[in-house]
């Protein structure tokens, strides 16, 4: 490596560190908080508050993502300025927001609802289903989601290579079905939990020798599908 290249590399590293520190500082400086309380057939509701400036209303951006393809279908902005009695002790109490959502214009599917204020994500991520199939898999048109973080996800099928002599039978006694069954480490995800992965809501009802810790094995009907899936790191959600 030439000397000038080394100097450039060094300056570049310094610059990157400076940017990192500045952005970390901005995140710390913006004292925002808030939550999405509900997402129903017509609205997304919640509250947001910039506690370093509680007298002015926070801008809120609601981001709606189609879970089957990861595409953002809408970014809706509003001002959190509706009076909420439960927040009056924090200042003016004018921190609520309610934003209409034209769900039917997005088409049938499962949608992740997230909101941001001052560059920070509000808590209370929701999932909303449009159409009968999505509503049935959610058991409701709208549910609360809790992120469990990034998991290693792999795939398996009833073949001997994947499931030994078990075939399609799961460790909880059910018959494994595609788009429904996942194999988990029950010490991490209890049996019966409903877990959303890539927009599909699965039920934890199987385990496997190779499935330990933050790892989920997803059931498919054929070995070709398991090979096509491979291994992916995915943020997974507990459906509550
Ligand atoms: Zn297989």
Image (tube, grey):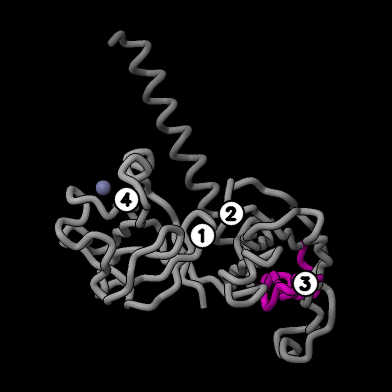
Depth check: give the residue in front, 45 or 101: 101
Q: Using the numbered discs, state the Cα–Cα distance from disc 2 to disc 1 in whole angstroms.
A: 8 Å
Residue for point 59% across, 73% down = 124
Residue for point 37% across, 38% down = 228
**Residue 46 lies in magenta, yes or no?**
yes
Are the two marked residues, 2 and 4, in contact with CB atoms closer than 8 angstroms? no
Cβ of mark 1 under 8 Å from ligand 1: the answer is no
Are the two marked residues, 2 and 3, in contact with CB atoms closer than 8 angstroms? no
Task: Answer left or right for 61 relative to 22.
Answer: right
Are the two marked residues, 1 and 3, in contact with CB atoms closer than 8 angstroms? no
Q: Earlier in the sequence, mark 1 or mark 4?
A: 4
Name the residue that disc number 3 marks. Answer: 41
Name the residue that disc number 2 marks. Answer: 67
Depth check: give the residue in front, 61 or 38: 38
Task: Answer left or right for 240 relative to 95.
Answer: left
Name the residue that disc number 4 marks. Answer: 154
Range drawn in magenta? 36-59
Q: Using the numbered discs, state the Cα–Cα distance from disc 4 to disc 3 in whole angstroms.
A: 34 Å
Depth check: give the residue in front, 30 or 132: 132
């Amino acid at each position: 490596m030439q000397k000038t290249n080394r100097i450039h590399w060094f300056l570049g590293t310094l610059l990157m560190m400076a940017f990192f520190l500045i952005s970390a500082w901005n995140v710390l400086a913006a004292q925002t908080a808030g939550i999405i309380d509900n997402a129903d057939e017509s609205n997304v509701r919640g509250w947001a508050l910039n506690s370093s400036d509680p007298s002015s209303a926070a801008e809120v951006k609601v981001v709606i993502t189609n879970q089957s393809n990861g595409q953002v279908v809408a970014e809706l902005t509003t001002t959190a300025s509706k009076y909420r009695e439960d927040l009056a002790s924090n200042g003016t109490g004018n921190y609520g927001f309610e934003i209409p959502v034209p769900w039917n214009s997005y088409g049938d599917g499962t949608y992740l609802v997230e909101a941001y204020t001052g560059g920070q994500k509000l808590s209370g991520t929701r999932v909303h289903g449009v159409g009968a199939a999505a509503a049935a898999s959610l058991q409701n048109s709208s549910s609360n989601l809790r992120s469990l973080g990034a998991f290693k996800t792999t795939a398996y099928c009833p073949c001997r290579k994947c499931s030994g002599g078990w075939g399609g039978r799961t460790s909880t006694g059910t018959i494994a079905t595609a788009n429904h069954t996942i194999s988990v480490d029950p010490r991490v995800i209890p049996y019966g939990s409903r877990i959303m992965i890539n927009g599909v809501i699965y039920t934890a009802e199987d385990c496997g020798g190779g499935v330990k810790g933050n790892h989920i094995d997803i059931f498919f009907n054929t070995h070709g599908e398991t090979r096509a899936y491979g291994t992916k790191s995915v943020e997974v959600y507990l459906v509550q």
